[in-house]
Image (cartoon, grey):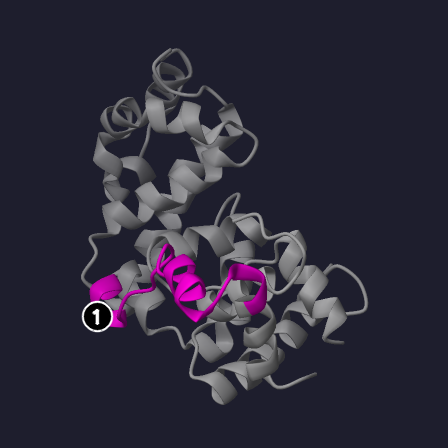
């Protein structure tokens, strides 16, 4: 594994200079843990839901219907969603103003229950996400995979990034860079691979002072293509 300064230099060269690189990185800002902790849990559930529905559906379609989603799911109040009745579920499945996918509609209820459970021990789910150490981001991904609904893999990664949590995303370009650097031998397929990625990111963060999101994006920009 080479020093991260050399990988930054590769990205700078591909993007046309340090200023250009920093401008691109500014497109996906992370926020302070205190900002995440202050988020109401209904906004956490909304962010989860948006990411769940993005998987397999056009983001543009979901975004165009988002006001209807907010209305249909009681503005994503976790308690209201967690205790959804079967009649309420049936009504949602007949609502033409949202995306009517049964498994994903049900995931809103399951994720609301998960957030309520987390809130009992942390005061709020937002505080749990805020306080979770970046050096164990892989552990947080495992919690979401095991205890939440439809939030494994990239969906969980992009959800966390969307609320401002520093987050690496195993996009094709990031994986290509990790294979190039000897962190992986093949695309990640399980917990062991995520732990290896975490270890590499922790080392690179120590070398560069960059957070997980910045390191992830720089890795992507250090290869020939970098879909964002």
Residue 119 location, x and y as percent? 28, 60
Residue 143 falls left or right of residue 112: right
Q: Tell which of 87 and 180 is nearer to you.
A: 180
Q: Quadrant of residue 211?
A: bottom left
Residue that badge 1 annotates: 34
Say which residue appears at 36% left-offset and 29% top-offset.
63
Badge 1 element: helix
Residue 149 location, x and y as percent? 50, 45
Please, is residue 159 above or below residue 126 in the view? above
Would you call the spot at circle 1 few (<14 residues within 10 Å), some (14-19), or many (20 or more)? few
Residue 79 location, x and y as percent? 25, 42
Q: Please identify the dominant SS of the magenta region.
A: helix
Residue 55 falls left or right of residue 91: right
Q: Residue furthest front?
A: 16
Please, is residue 6 above or below residue 226 in the view? below
Say which residue appears at 42% left-offset and 23% top-offset.
61
Q: Is residue 33 magenta?
A: yes
Q: How many marks?
A: 1
Say which residue appears at 61% left-offset and 71% top-offset.
10
- Which stretch did the figure color magenta? 13-37
Can you see residue 166?
no
Q: Quadrant of residue 222?
A: bottom right
Residue 129 location, x and y as percent? 35, 65
Q: Tell which of 183 and 141 is nearer to you.
A: 183
Say which residue appears at 54% left-offset and 75% top-offset.
8
Task: State the quadrant of the N terminus.
Answer: bottom right
Q: Is residue 161 magenta?
A: no
Q: Tell which of 186 and 174 is nearer to you.
A: 174
């Amino acid at each position: 594994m080479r020093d991260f300064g050399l990988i930054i230099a590769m990205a700078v060269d591909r993007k046309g200079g340090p200023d250009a690189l920093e401008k691109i990185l500014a497109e996906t800002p992370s926020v302070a843990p205190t900002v995440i902790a202050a988020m109401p849990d209904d906004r956490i559930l909304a962010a989860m839901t948006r990411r769940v529905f993005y998987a397999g559906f056009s983001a543009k379609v979901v975004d165009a219907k988002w006001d209807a989603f907010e209305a249909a799911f009681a503005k994503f109040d976790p308690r209201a969603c967690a205790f959804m009745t079967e009649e309420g579920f049936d009504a949602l499945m007949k609502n033409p103003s949202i995306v009517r996918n049964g498994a994903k509609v049900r995931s809103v209820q399951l994720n609301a229950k998960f957030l309520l459970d987390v809130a009992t021990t942390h005061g709020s789910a937002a505080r749990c996400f805020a306080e979770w150490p970046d050096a164990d981001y892989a552990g947080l991904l495992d919690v979401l995979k095991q205890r939440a609904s439809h939030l494994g893999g990239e969906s969980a990664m992009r959800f966390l990034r969307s609320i401002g949590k520093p987050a690496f995303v195993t996009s094709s370009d990031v994986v290509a860079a990790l294979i190039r650097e000897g962190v992986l031998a093949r695309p990640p397929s399980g917990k062991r691979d995520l732990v290896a990625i975490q270890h590499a990111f922790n080392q690179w963060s120590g070398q560069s002072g960059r957070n997980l999101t910045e390191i992830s994006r720089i890795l992507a920009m250090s290869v020939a293509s970098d879909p964002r």
